[in-house]
Image (tube, rainbow, N blue to C red):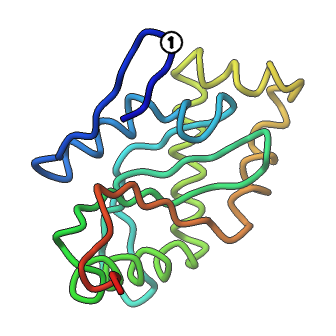
Amino acid sequence: MIVSGTQKYFPSQFNNEAEIEKVVRDYAEYLFGSSILFIPKSKITTAGGVGTIPDGFVIDVESEEWFIVEAELAAHGTSQHIAPQLSKQITAVDSPTTRETLLKVALVIVKSDKGAAAVFSDLGIAQLDIHGTLQTILKKPPTIAIPIDGVPADLQA
């Protein structure tokens, strides 16, 4: 249980990954910070043509880092499900083509969403510098973020 002021929060079970994904989408700023762009599910492909769909991407403009987001249920297990999925995702984002695609999607979000555009203006980043800023961030290796409902049995001691 977590107590905050007069509010009490109790742990609850998730029925499926979609519920965890929704929490991440709805509360991305609380989880990753206020200076972020959230890119929803997008299919990415390895250089060898293997497709995978992470649950999202987060670009933290202020800290100049980015994340692959993959929501999981602990019941899926690490070895059989989570690790192979992450392996494909890491391989896919290593491709310059994938990073260019993510850059284009991020630029569309900034152009169409005033809140996303405000992230840059709040940090003093001029509109003409947004492309270069995002490109610089996406050249770095991503951090893997795995919102998960528990510890998988194959990781417990």
> Residue 117, relative to residue 42: is it above or below?
above
Residue for badge 1: 5
- What amino acid type should be assigned to the residue bearing mark 1? Gly
> Residue 70, relative to residue 96: is it above or below?
above
Q: Quadrant of the N terminus?
A: top left
Quarter-of-image position of residue 140: bottom right
Residue 23 percent across, percent down from the top left: 33, 36
Q: Quadrant of the C terminus?
A: bottom left
Point 39% across, 67% down: residue: 44
Quarter-of-image position of residue 137: bottom right
Toward the top, the furthest residue is 6
Q: Nearer the viewer, residue 127 or 77?
A: 77
Q: Nearer the viewer, residue 134 or 154?
A: 154
Q: Is residue 61 left or right of residue 13?
A: right
Q: Circle 1 — which element?
A: loop
Point 65% across, 28% down: residue: 34
Point 45% across, 85% down: residue: 47
Q: Nearer the viewer, residue 84 or 101?
A: 84
> Residue 46, relative to residue 63: is it above or below?
below
Residue 64 percent across, percent down from the top left: 78, 50
Residue 115 percent across, percent down from the top left: 59, 17
**Residues packed near mark 1 inside 10 Å, few (<14), some (14 to 19) or many (20 plus):** few
